[in-house]
Image: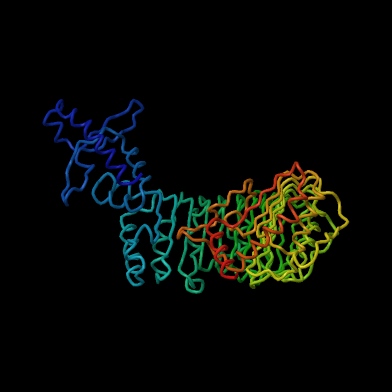
Amino acid sequence: MGMLSLNHLMLKQKRWSRRRTQALTLKQKRCSRRRTHARNGSTITLVPQKDLLCQEGGERSTYLGPNLPEDIWCHIHSLMPLQDAARSASISHTFLRSWRCHPYLNFTKETLCSKQNASRKGYTASRFIMTVDQILKNHSGIGVKTLKLYFPCYCEVDACHINRWLQIAITPGIEEVTLMLPTNYMKKYSFPCSLLFGGRGNSIQYIRLNECAFRPPVGFDCLRSLTNLRLFRVCITCDELGSLISNCFALEKLELGFCHELIFLKIPLCLERLSFLLVSSCHKLQVIESKAPNLLTFNFFCGPVRLSLGESSCVKNLDIIPNMPNSLRYAITKLPSVVPNLETLNVTSADERVNTPMAAHKFLNLKYLKIHLIPFSKAFSPAYDYLSLVSFLDASPTLETFILIVKQNDMKHDSVFGNALHVRRIPAHKHSRLRKVQISGFCSAKSMVELTCHILEKATSLESLTVDTIFDQCNQGTVVEHGDCSRRCVQKESRCGPISRDMILEAHKALRAVNIYIIERVPPAVQLNVRAPCSHCHKLLLTLLICCA
């Protein structure tokens, strides 16, 4: 509820009070406060006549407010955005009292600086510091539930300022602490763990720290209610992190990103409630060992590490981007034994130099598989055989959904149009559970056409096949059920996204390959969805073809 909603409420109450004013005596009008005693003996404070004020033309005008308990007005005040709450406290004694225990302190560049001044480097820093100081000056620190400090990118703030603000806000009862410091502050600022001592940290449920050091001492036992911990670009060692989380028995989500001091990550058995773990870009990390018995979702975006999740691992959802060549080979050879109960698997590879081998073990419970082939270079390796992806299908007897996403600006594989197509046949089991298949970035590569033909032949329960001839980043995570592509890749500027001339020409070849080699192989019970470039891309394609002619 912002200032407009408050003014609307005050105007409505003013009309009501105008009718009541005629029945009041002059003596009653001059009274500034009334108190009534409830039957249970408690005191109810009514809104004073001269307390709820609105500014009009720089002057204060009074109106007779409604007989609402003060705690109701405090609740209304707590629902306002930070700026509106601070402004109303400057013109109302009632709101000034409630401001001193305002529960939500959200300091960001957007809420504290105007758009015109937000881009001015010097102004942003000085204005941000001055505004936060002024707002917290009249706050008692009592009743704070949420503290969010998002510093502008160029905001140079001394540690003494940050520590003073944290000292005011982190009090018993606080539930959420977010500290987003400017870039390259990891070596400039260390979060004061002492602020969490004395019971002040035991009510905190959510902590997010960016760009700082966090050094919890041995035996750190101050975050007993913590359920969500997010550390990004934070300096913290393996022992310090272990000391921190070993006593967080309520922890449910743990996210670690760009924590470059971590070498060994060990999740203890005592974290029985931990269900989500994310580890991203911790480049020195070598080992991840988890004994958390109820870990269900694990997102891993790092270099090659040794994973140990226990033989009875309960992980059902795995999103993995190994920062190394041949990620698909790693996934199919290592993961079946590491995560035997896996149901959903997302694998991203930027460089596949060898074909995907057959698996020694199977994903016995895998139902959803998504593979991203997104190379760093312009073209994906022409040596990679897309048909070798059958290894994943063969290793997943319960697979129901398969999504393949390929992004490359220049197709270097052998084209299906070079010679007459002789589909290679791979001795494989029937994919009897596979119902939905989507290939985004379908091209005219011979091995990709062979993969599609193999799926149509072996997937006996197939219901729908979606072939998208353009890498569609808007639909990477969902299976498309229709073929509408009239304006699907048009951006806000009324033009398509990063689709090159070569991609548009290749999409034209891919459509020819679908018409010649795919459509005739589709069983009657299978719904085929062919997604071409959008209408804008089609116009560009016609222009290119005319120019080439």
Using the image as rendered, state which of residue 30 and residue 329 is in the foreground.
329
In this rendering, is residue 442 above or below 283? above
Relative to residue 160, is residue 313 depicted above or below? Answer: above
Quarter of the image for residue 75 reads top left
Residue 163, quarter of the rendered image:
bottom left
Q: Residue furthest right?
A: 427
Side (left or right) of 114 relative to 323: left
Residue furthest out toward the front: 549
- Residue 68 shown left or right of residue 343 in the figure: left
Left or right: 491 in relation to 416: left
- Residue 104, x across and y down, in percent: 40, 50
Name the spot of residue 331 as percent of width and height, x first. Answer: 75, 61
Q: Is residue 307 left or right of residue 67?
A: right
Can residue 324 be seen at all in this image of the molecule? no
- Which colour style is shown? rainbow
State the image coordinates of residue 327 (x, y, percent, origin top left): 73, 66
Relative to the observer, which residue lies in front, 549 or 286?
Answer: 549
Compare residues 194 and 322 and report the one nearer the observer. Answer: 322
- Residue occupying the point 79% across, 64% down: 356
Quadrant containing the N terminus in the rendered view: top left
Relative to 73, is 86 above or below? below
Q: Residue furthest left?
A: 26
Q: Nearer the viewer, residue 135 or 462?
A: 462
Question: Measured from the top left, where is residue 90 in percent x and y?
Answer: 25, 51
Regarding residue 292, the answer to whether it shows in the image is yes
Q: Residue at x 82, y 54 (%)?
A: 394
Question: Residue at coordinates 76% horizontally, 48% vertically from top-left?
Answer: 522
Q: Quadrant of the C terminus?
A: bottom right
